[in-house]
Image: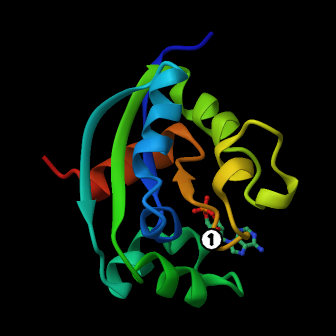
Amino acid sequence: MSDVEQTLSIIKPDAVERDLQNKIKDEFIKSGFTIIKEKKIHITKIEAEEFYKVHQTKPFYNDLCEYLSSGPIFVMILEKFNAILDNRELMGATDPKKADEGTIRKKYGVSIDKNSVHGSDSSENAKKEIQFFFKD
Ligand code: CMP
């Protein structure tokens, strides 16, 4: 059974660069999410490395951290019933080329790296990721 959950969402540099943040936020709101907290920030590479630590053994880790720290991002706490899975469904597959029609990554993603949005993949990671950006 689903429950009211919170998940961490990031609008990544490629989307902010194209001024897509309001369109993407509208997608969340239209899909029933409430934006509980949000802020626009520009993180350092060291902060990106800490955030994406789960991927540190992957070949794309360095590029991923360079990229997330390359420009401003929006970080948000999203809330709704079943937020974690529903957000992943709304975002679509990691690779925009493989994402279903109507998903955020299909509409706005450029490549597997520049895929416009990040969303927590589990309840445990949602808690960690929310805590990472919103410490209070
Ligand atoms: P995200 O959901 O933010 O989580 C990790 C990111 O790594 C992912 O989105 C992609 O943008 C990026 N990435 C780059 N290459 C790959 C890959 N081969 N497989 C998965 N993720 C990748």
Q: Dot 1: what SS?
A: loop
Query: As rendered, which of 61 and 66 lies closer to the eye?
Result: 66
Residue 131, percent across and down? 28, 51
Residue 55, percent across and down? 60, 73
Q: Which residue is mark 1?
A: 114
Q: Position of residue 70 (x, y in %)?
A: 42, 83
Residue at 41 percent across and 77 percent down: it is 48
Question: Considering the image in quadrants, where does the N terminus appear?
Answer: top right
Where is 69 relative to 114, above or below? Answer: below
Task: For ligand 1, tell me if the residue under mark 1 lies within 8 Å.
Answer: yes
Direction from residue 66 to residue 50 in the image, left or right = left
Horizontal relation, residue 134 to residue 113: left or right: left
Q: Decide which of 24, 124 is in the foreground and name it.
A: 24
Identified by mark 1, the residue type is: Lys
Q: Residue furthest left?
A: 136
Which picture quadrant has residue 44? bottom left
Q: Is residue 45 above or below residue 92?
A: below
Q: Position of residue 130 (x, y in %)?
A: 33, 47
Seen at 51% across and 37% down, the residue is 123
In the image: residue 60, left or right of residue 13: right
